[in-house]
Image (cartoon, rainbow, N blue to C red):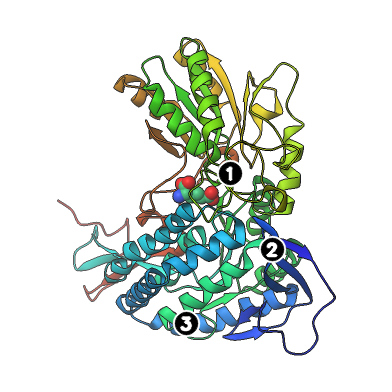
Amino acid sequence: MTTETSAPASGAPAASVVTSIVDGKPVDGVRTVTGRNPARLDEIVAEISLADADTFVDAAASAKRAQPAWAAVPAPIRGRAIAHIGRLVEANMHELAALVTRDIGKPYGEALGEVREIVDTCDFFLGEGRRLYGQTVPSEMPDKQLFTFRNPVGTVAVITAGNFPVAVPSWYIVPALLCGNTVVWKPAEYSAAVSAAFHEIFVRGGGLPPGVFNVVHADGPATFAGLESALDAGTVDKVGFTGSPEVGREIGALTGRHLQTACLELGGKNPLVVTPSADLALAVEGALFSGFGTAGQRCTSLGTAIVHESRHDEFIERFAQATADAVVGDPTGEVLMGPLLDEKFAQRYEEYLDWIQPHHTVYGATGRITAESPRPGFRGEPGNGLYYHPVIVDGVRPGDALFDRETFGPIVGVTSYRDFDEAIELANAPGYGLSSSIYTTDPKDAFAFRGRIGAGMVSINNSTSGAEAHLPFGGNGKSGNGSRQSGLWVLDQFTRWQSMNWDYSGKLQKAQMDVAEL
Ligand code: UN1
């Protein structure tokens, strides 16, 4: 997390300062913010030198210059670079995970899983360098052959959130590089320290030439201004963005004006349906992890549990008990939940708590965990970190902000339904469409849910969060523009199809006019 500090540092930055890297060289920013450990606010993780819009423009220009030579590296060799990156991440797994925990307060076990996700992504794509298949296609004319090729898009700007400061960036950066693109990455300011470590490992592990992978640490306005200028200058050919639907809309509008389609991965209000036949113990376990894992700060976190009226009271009782028993505290230990990511998110979360209405029933305490508002079984020093009580709010309905809108934090809504149609209606009502889950032992319900839910991702008897890195990841409605990351599907984001025809008949054969007769 970050706090504003002093005026711009003059001269060479101190060793602990994180700077942008453009064309292989560090670039001083225009102001400095301090990155703090959200579990221990007096612990400084890094001083971050934030760049202005011009640095973003320079980075895009550098990526543009480096791109032809990188695309000329044979794809299998680019695949080997990805393989080396994966091995280096694996060798530094514990250090990188510890830095994730220190920088954003993610519990260490989850942080390790997040780093594993980079390795999984590298493992998946290293072999793709030997495929990147095109097709040979028959022609309607004799002595003529048709082909398709995947060409790199060019220069990719990647703008990511800090809740998954290394895994989600790897979903863009690994396939983008593999496909022969060069990259400008703008990580979240509050996860700059671990982003710098990620960048260093990628450049060193992959032996990436200067300009192939640039990183720009900047705030939102500077990034937006820089991106707009780079799009105008033709030095950004594709944008990948993970963040809020509001910013996603702006990126979509900006790229649309430049006749581009961004890859947008936005928020979620992910439903978890508990049917009459559900295994309740399993459903509670799934709700607990997807509601409060990462302190509810995943785009795939549980929004509302939609429980059949016949199971509602028992579900609430068990879920409230499990939440009360859950270990919250120091993220370096074994806890379900650590602090929130950053002061900005803590403030926003406190506003979400104001959405609780008199007709709601609240289970558990709300607000900050302090000496005055202690949590039994808390591990660590609550007063010194951004720790919040995990809270369940029962009785949320469409029209309530808590039902309709994403709350990036440890708050889970619960509502009940009478029949399956109502469950589907409630699940789709908020208009997001990222992840979803149903707990049932009836395959008919499971398949009906899959067919009728608006979400891009469906879990049957599993948590809404925790997608594997080789399935298509992405959402519909307010959760994105239909683009998909991960697995083979992401190749369509970072390559453009080119078709070729080769006529070796020695004469002009005209398509549609000189078609071969039977
Ligand atoms: C996010 O919060 O932006 O499926 C991504 C999951 C993780 C990724 C979350 N693998 O929960």
Quadrant containing the N terminus is bottom right
Label 1: which secondary element: helix
Task: For marks 2 and 3, give the one nearer the viewer.
Answer: 2
Residue closer to the observer: 147 or 140: 147
> 491 or 119, which lies in front?
119
**Which image quadrant for residue 35?**
bottom right
Give residue 295's mark. Answer: 1
504 with respect to 469 (left or right): left
Q: Is mark 1 within 8 Å of ligand 1?
A: no
Residue 36, disc: 2
Is 483 or 273 nearer to us in this picture? 273
Secondary structure category for the residue under label 3: helix
Give how far across and how far down residue 447 sits, in percent.
34, 26
Residue at 36% x, 20% y is 445
User: Marks 2/3: CA distance?
Assistant: 39 Å
Q: Is mark 2 within 8 Å of ligand 1?
A: no
Q: Give the residue displayed 57% in from the left and 67% down from the top.
A: 194
Asked if 209 appears above or below 177 in the picture, the reply is: below
Q: Residue at position x 73%, y 53% from top?
A: 343
Task: Name which residue type carries label 2.
Answer: Arg
Disc marking residue 502? none
Q: As shown in the figure, which amino acid type bears the numbered disc 3?
A: Pro
**Residue 397 % position (x, y):** 64, 20
